[in-house]
Image (tube, helix red, strand yellow):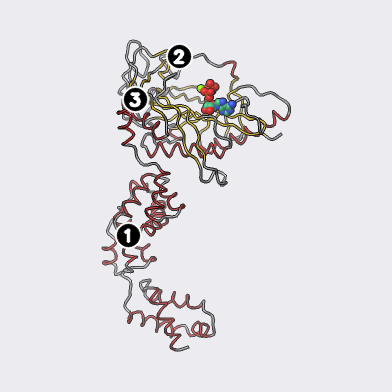
Amino acid sequence: MKYEAVIGLEVHIQVRTASKMFCSCPNRNGAEPNTLVCPVCMGYPGVLPVPNHEAIRQTVRAGLLTNCRIATFSKFDRKNYFYPDMPKNYQISQYDLPFCRAGYVEIGGTGFSGQPLANRKIGITRIHLEEDVAKLTHTAGQSGVDYNRAGIPLMEVVSEPDMRTPDEAYAYLTALKEIMRYGEISDCDMEKGQLRCDVNVSLRPEGQSEFGTKIEIKNLNSFRAVHRALEYEIWRQAQELDAGHRLRQETRGWNDDHVETYLMRTKEEAHDYRYFPEPDLMPVTFTEAEIEKIRSELPELPEAMRLRFRRDYGLTEYDAGVLTQDRDLARYFEAAARVGATPKLVANWVISELLRELGSRGLALADCPVPPTALAGLVTLIERKTINGTIGKTVLTAMFDSGKTPEEIVREQGLAQVSDDSAIAGFVAEVIAACPEQVAQYRAGNAKVLQYLVGQVMKRSRGKANPQLAVAQLKRYFEEQP
Ligand code: ADP
Ligand code: ZN
Ligand code: MG
């Protein structure tokens, strides 16, 4: 039987704030366990939570960036459960009145497997804000609890069951992460646990409109794992259904080493969280004017930026795509392109040479010693034919090494291109005298040899000859003395 997969994602994203959600402990990863704690996030009796307004504002921004409607009246609720990751025995979350509802994220482009994806909108059911829980680690018969994570503001982004393939799920996650990073809402670093994702997937016979029984997969620690787990689970469910088995609602884990999902628990053991409104916190209200104010201050999103880069700077889809993968890279490019060099050339230099220099030195863009104006200066020197592209690469390396401007380096090292006709004529005469064999071949009709001769001129000028002039002079020589 042919089946169609139905996929919905629940994504937890830590909000980047200075302090935790309901106390003034720092919101930070990587500290010694249980050093960033206080009576509030340790759940001592008698303490009161104080909401972090910045986390609430960032959640509203996340909602606006994903086309959600923002609630003018919202509240926090208690989600009751007993587990050592939450010493209060409840988590402050949001139940029926989340901050954001009914949004969507657009996907398209190329999927994880390299196949083109149709442009589609993936619905967002809701985004609510809650407090993160402590991190449990289990090793060799011992368990550890780190409360540094308890109380970090955590958004939950629940998607509609709108995705149909692992590629679409991958694209949705990529788009969501890109939006959160552009919005400076979260770095979404999965390795640091800043983005965590549960996947729901069911199968239905092709053509059927009702959804099948959904299975949730946890323990997914990379987007690639999400893709692989979905591929596996779609295959597994199809086998089960083909064998005439009925699926039950269950939660499964993903084992990346064995490349398979395994049963964690069935839905009969599901919790009743006995949600009720958090009595220690006031409801949160926004006026329409306040929401519009936040909307007016939103940054441009990558998709809009890609279109603008293609339109305003004449970039290709590929160039615009590479430059907007990272907001800082996009800003770097724009800062360089605005100085006056041809934007398409600036894009080439950023994408090929600048990124290569950064990569080979293990530098992040933030630590790049070459400011955008200096890169623009380099491109301008090439455009004015003061230097050629090959010398340009040498100059860029020197700019990284010394922090000097391209003009300084060209002057100090005498790298300016030789565009002086008589100087080039000298090199051409030398080459013709030194390469009688190739000269004869050219005269015999082998036009390709010209490249070799130009190369020799470049070599003799130590790369500084203007190559167009070298070509022109060589051609002229052969025209005059065929
Ligand atoms: P639960 O009550 O089990 O948490 P929800 O209705 O809240 O279920 O949905 C949780 C997630 O599962 C959502 O992202 C939703 O899109 C997705 N989902 C719901 N039903 C299905 C289904 N039949 N197949 C796949 N995904 C589903
Ligand atoms: Zn605290
Ligand atoms: Mg749910």
Q: Mark 3 or mark 1, which has the lower sequence index?
A: 3
Crowdedness of circle 2 by 10 Å Cα count: few (<14), some, many (20+)?
A: some
Measure how far apart labels 3 and 2 are at the Cα level: 22 Å
Say which amino acid is labelled 1: Ala
Instruction: Identify the element where label 2 is drawn.
Output: loop
Q: Residue furthest front?
A: 288
Q: How many marks?
A: 3
The residue shown at (38%, 71%) is: 463
Measure how far apart labels 1 and 2 are at the Cα level: 60 Å
User: Label for residue 20?
Assistant: 3
Is label 1 in contact with label 2 (beta carbons under 8 Å)?
A: no
Q: Mark 3 or mark 2, which has the lower sequence index?
A: 3
Measure how far apart labels 3 and 1 are at the Cα level: 45 Å
Q: Does the residue labelled 2 lie within 8 Å of ligand 3?
A: no
Q: Does the residue labelled 3 lie within 8 Å of ligand 2?
A: yes
- Report which quarter residue 33 is drawn in: top left
Q: Position of residue 346 (x, y in %)?
A: 36, 57
- Report which quarter residue 93 is drawn in: top left
The residue carrying mark 1 is 341
Q: Where is residue 179 in the image (x, y as percent from the top left)?
A: 41, 38
Of residue 350 and residue 458, the one placed in the foreground of this image is: 350
The residue shown at (58%, 37%) is: 165
Crowdedness of circle 1 by 10 Å Cα count: few (<14), some, many (20+)?
A: many
Crowdedness of circle 3 by 10 Å Cα count: few (<14), some, many (20+)?
A: many
User: Label for residue 275?
Assistant: 2
